[in-house]
Amino acid sequence: MRARVPFIINGLFLLFLLALAVWVNAAGAAEQRPNILFILTDNQAASLLGAYGNPDIRTPHIDNLAREGILFTRAYAVNGMCSPTRATLMTGLMPSQHGIHSWLDDELLDQWPEDWSAVAEFRTLPLTLKNRGYQTAMIGKWHLGQPWKASIGYQYWITFPYGHTVDFWDNTIIDNDGTYRVKDRHIVDFFTDKAVDYLREYTGEKPFYLQLNYDGPYTNPPTNYGPARNRFYQDYVGKEFKSFPRTAYNENLVEQLLGGNTSPFLRNKLREGLAMHNDPATMANVASQNTLVDDGVGRVLAALREQGLEKNTLVIFSSDQGNFYGQHGLWQHTIVTAPASMYETAMNIPLIIKHPDNIKAGQTTDLLIGQYDIPVTILDYVGMGDVRFDNSPGKSFRFALTGETGRWRDAVFYEQEETRVIRTENYTYWKRLRSTGKPALYDVKKDPEQNRDVYADPAYQEIIADLDNRLTAFFDKYADEKYDLWQGGGAKGSVDRPEIFRRLYGPDWTPQTEIKPAFHE
């Protein structure tokens, strides 16, 4: 027995060294993972930014971010409203999978379960990162359920209660475990200040994932109608604004107002949209809110540099979705028309990604990117490519960031309750749920502004048949029967026109907010 003791001790020592080596390697891998700063704006179409060709609106910091990284010209939202798109960015799932088909109505907040989080049942990006060594923070707009405490893996939490902003200057703030009023600062400036503070207080013990959700530029009334109260508004008063279309109002809006079948909420949105249309003060307001957001982005990026964090931080800049600002006679969201209008302006979002020395500066790519691709790519980029969002249609475009070659798809898909869309290199095809409206086809190569619907043109019938088959096959695969509105499924929180689904599925059809079992790894 005595002769074996040294052997046993040596064996245990070797096991200890092996375990230590594994631990050191794991710790080293964690240290090498980049920080992640994900800046998400609210209702900001790509076409409102200088980097995407807008000649009227000053966005120098975002434009410079594009020069220092890679700009995606054809990234698309999955929906025309904020809650569904934000849910997709967290889960990699389509609205017909995660169940959020429209904005979560603030007026129903008191009716939701106290701890209701609309996406907690799924794997989410922040929870996945937290479980693998990141410290996680969310500063800004939430709008995915009850806002009163941190959710889906966030450890640091600053938000405000609502999704619809009625005042940029007077808001209740939820700051981790406390609440207070902020009346002395524009909400965009407030969230910028908090993000800068977070970066200055960062200790470096773990890589951080900071989700900065600006509640601007917004592009909705009442905050964006008429003159604005911010420091950039006067810079735009009296400008010509060539990038803002001067068009006749969209007749669909008036038809809804005269028809009398629209809910009071939507009727008010229609009136507001008509008031904003072709209004110079509103144009100056929208321009100034975009410049204010850009100023905030500049301050946050400067804080990264000042803290020595720039080189090891992956910066992602995007928007939940765009809004119309005159195109096709429309202002505000896709849902102001019945059925929804899924034109490029509202669906084409900015996407700019930067990581110094790792992503080559000054790149532009026209890959067709869906929002469901973004969380998948983030995990892959930071070395977690083995993690899967179950049944997500998302694919990693990491190869485009690292300069490698890779095969890519030729279509993206999006949906808005009664409308489903396939967008390919050459065409955008809108399909409608039965009895809700006419389909549409746009040849975006010949008609990039989508002014001529060619659905009835005999020359396009084979193309329509192919696109229809592809669209049907996509949702056959990527729709959950619980939340598939086209097959009698339900929705979470609220929908814009519930009467459509009650007519199709019965008077008892109603959105749900029950708490589902939370996702655990």
Image: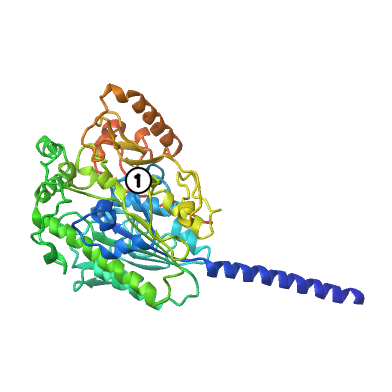
Report the amino acid beneath label 1: Val
53 vs 502: above or below: below
Q: Image quarter for residue 41?
A: bottom left
Question: In the drawing, does residue 115 fall left or right of residue 253?
Answer: right
Query: Which residue is rendered at x = 56% and y = 53% of the image?
Result: 386
331 vs 57: above or below: above
Q: Image quarter for residue 71?
A: bottom left
Measuring from the top left, give residue 379's x and y in whole percent.
49, 57
Measuring from the top left, give residue 120's x and y in whole percent.
42, 55
- Residue placed most toward the observer, 461 or 217: 461
- How many discs appear? 1
**Colour scheme of the picture:** rainbow
Q: Image quarter for residue 251?
A: top left
Measuring from the top left, give residue 187's x and y in whole percent.
23, 67
Query: Residue beneath label 1, please?
Result: 78
Q: Tag 1: Cα neighbours inside 10 Å, few (<14), some, or many (≥20)?
A: many
Quadrant location of the N terminus in the rendered image: bottom right
140 vs 109: above or below: below
Residue 326 at least partly seen: yes
Measuring from the top left, give residue 404's x and y in whole percent.
51, 52
Residue furthest to the front in view is 362
- Residue placed most toward the observer, 415 or 239: 239
Question: In the drawing, does residue 19 fall left or right of residue 250?
Answer: right
Question: In the drawing, does residue 105 fall left or right of residue 357?
Answer: left
Quadrant location of the C terminus in the rendered image: bottom right
Q: Is mark 1 on a helix, strand or loop?
A: loop
Residue furthest to the top in view is 458
Residue 507 at least partly seen: no
